[in-house]
Image: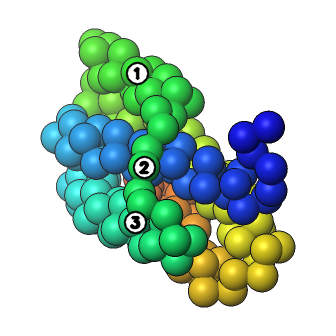
């Protein structure tokens, strides 16, 4: 049995997240480029910068656990990005495309929120408050991004696309 403790499971999940975040640093510039609405473009660019910070925090997280950072291909993120890419190939009006891009990005954020929620809880369970706080900072940013995308969708883009 390779994964004996919750800490082993936590390391495993962090490896998945490191892969997911690294994939996103490559996907977000494409979303920003494809977006038309200036606020949406800016939101993607801002989240790209935050995502680079998420990679840094994960590297720190491994350090706190006395491990060297390793990533294990996150197949879920690969799939979400692939879906996003096929959406980008659709022949859609700019506002409709923006609505599609928001939908794709929110699926990604929800995946990240679920994953960071899990690792935060596990870090608390093993009594590593510093790690829980560190991962909690990223969780907050993912939630803020999700909220911002909802606002953009509701206030501007869906209205214009309809
Ligand atoms: Fe992230
Ligand atoms: Fe994110």
The image position of residue 115, as x and y in percent, is: 64, 52
Q: Is residue 22 visible to us here?
A: yes
Vertical arrangement, residue 50 with respect to residue 4, above or below? below
As drawn, 9 above or below 67 = above
Label located before the other in sequence (1 or 2):
2
Q: Secondary structure at mark 3?
A: helix
Q: Earlier in the sequence, mark 2 or mark 3?
A: 3
Instruction: Name the one closer to the observer, 109 or 57.
Output: 57
Residue designated by label 2: 70
Which residue is at the far front? 1
Disc sitting over residue 59 in the figure: 3
Q: Nearer the viewer, residue 79 or 154?
A: 79
How busy is the neighbourhood of tag 3: few (under 14 within 10 Å), some, or many (20 plus)?
A: some
| Label 3, label 1: how far apart the Cα atoms are | 26 Å
- Marks 2,3: beta carbons within 8 A: no
Question: Which residue is labeled 1 in the image?
Answer: 82
Residue 77 in picture, x, y percent from top left: 49, 34
How far from the left and from the top, in percent, is residue 7? 72, 62
């Amino acid at each position: 049995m390779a994964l004996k403790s919750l800490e082993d499971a936590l390391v495993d999940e962090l490896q998945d997240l490191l892969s997911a975040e690294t994939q996103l640093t490559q996907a977000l510039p494409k979303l920003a480029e494809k977006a038309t609405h200036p606020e949406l473009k800016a939101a993607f660019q801002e989240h790209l910068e935050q995502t680079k910070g998420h990679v840094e925090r994960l590297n720190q997280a491994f350090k706190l656990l006395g491990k060297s950072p390793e990533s294990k291909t996150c197949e879920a993120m690969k799939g979400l990005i692939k879906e996003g890419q096929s959406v980008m190939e659709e022949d859609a009006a700019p506002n409709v495309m923006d609505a599609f891009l928001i939908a794709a990005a929110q699926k990604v954020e929800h995946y990240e929120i679920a994953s960071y929620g899990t690792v935060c809880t596990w870090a608390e369970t093993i009594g590593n408050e510093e790690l829980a706080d560190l991962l909690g900072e990223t969780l907050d940013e993912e939630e803020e991004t999700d909220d911002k995308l909802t606002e953009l969708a509701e206030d501007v883009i869906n209205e214009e696309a309809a």
